[in-house]
Amino acid sequence: MIDMIARPLAGRQPVKLRIALVTARGALELDEDMPVLAAALQDAGAAVETPCWDDPAIDWTRYGAALLRSTWDYADRNDEFLAWCDRCSARTRLLNASAVVGWNTDKHYLADLARAGVPVVPTRFVEPGADACAELEDFLADRPTSLTVGRSDGFDEFVVKPAIGAGSRDAARYRRSDRALALEHVNRLVAADRSLMLQPYLSRVDEYGETAILYLGGQFSHAIRKGPLLRPGAAMVEGMFAPEQIQPRKAERAELDVAAAAFAAIPFAAPDYARIDLLRDTRDAPVVLELELTEPSLFLAHAPGAADTFAAHLVQRLRESKATG
């Protein structure tokens, strides 16, 4: 009798860990990571589904974890999205965690990184209700305020973009001679009750591109070169994200060091995935443009083995967590 209880019944398979790779309507077919990661998770023994985060018919308790992937419409519905994150976290394990997402979806986190000693792109935050004209003139004159992070070394071009945004939507690059157009952009965001950012355009990106440093399972995984996105005079991005030029890159030591400092400065337990986007400043030193912890593309197809390693980490972590209750 004891032997029969201890031995699984013939033909019975262990219950698979069910993982939701969370997406958004209109994003699933655009997510190049999704088929790669889904296949890797299935090979690691998990059952995978791809529900939309705002589908009211989804029972999130069915999943051992919900992994945020292509929820790329969150920026236009941020309060709704964060409320869903909290509800989902009460029903299953949300990755990355709800508190991490709440901090990361608003780029005011750049101030937290700067206070921790991480070099970031010089940024002036402009808040709803501010005098848009005065803020823009002070920025162009390099007159810092308490809402300024870092200090520029002078610039000919600059960027206006929302503090809560994704995929370069509502972001634009301007010359100093375009200040009237830039002011219209700033006024529009302020009038819509949105915080925004004014940043010098670091022109080294035109030649060198961005460097994206990917952390998976708390460890450095791979690096990617992203081509420049913002062109002077270009129309605003209308889709979910601006098209990107992607290729593998061997990160330099200085880039890895800055990325490691940014990852260490996250004021939460190490997240399961992170992308640190870096630019080169006027001294050719790497600085953080963005710290992506919510729904970043991970460029898994450009890093052989990365998806398998990440999937193995996720499955092991979730099984261990389930075993310990």
Image (tube, grey):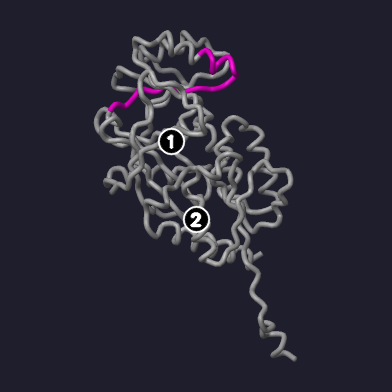
Q: Amino acid at mark 2?
A: Leu
- Residue at (33%, 42%) from the top-left corner? 225
Q: What quarter of the picture does the N terminus occupy?
A: bottom right
Per the image, label 1 sits on a secondary structure element best described as: strand
Q: State the image coordinates of residue 50 (x, y, percent, origin top left).
A: 60, 51
Judge the density around disc 2: few (<14), some (14-19), many (≥20) Cα neighbours within 10 Å.
Answer: many
**In the rendered structure, which segment of residues is drawn in magenta?**
187-203
Residue 17: name its quadrant. bottom right
Location of residue 233 with respect to 134 vertically, above or below? below
- Residue at (33%, 22%) from the top-left corner? 152
Residue 282: name its quadrant. top left
Per the image, label 2 sits on a secondary structure element best described as: helix
Is 16 a magenta residue?
Answer: no
Labels 1 and 2: the sequence-earlier one: 2
Residue 239 visible: yes
Which residue is the site of mark 2?
37
- 165 or 134: nearer the eye? 165
Q: Amino acid at mark 1?
A: Glu
- Residue at (37%, 11%) from the top-left corner? 178
Which residue is the site of mark 1?
290
Disc 1 and disc 2 in contact, CB within 8 angstroms: no
- Residue at (37%, 45%) from the top-left corner? 213
| Tag nearer the camera, 1 or 2 | 2
Judge the density around disc 1: few (<14), some (14-19), many (≥20) Cα neighbours within 10 Å.
Answer: some
Q: State the image coordinates of residue 105 (x, y, percent, origin top left).
A: 54, 35
Residue 270 visible: no
Q: State the image coordinates of residue 133 (x, y, percent, origin top left).
A: 47, 8
Location of residue 51 with respect to 108 vertically, above or below? below
The reply, left or right, for residue 244 in relation to residue 312 is left
Is 194 a magenta residue?
Answer: yes
Image mark count: 2
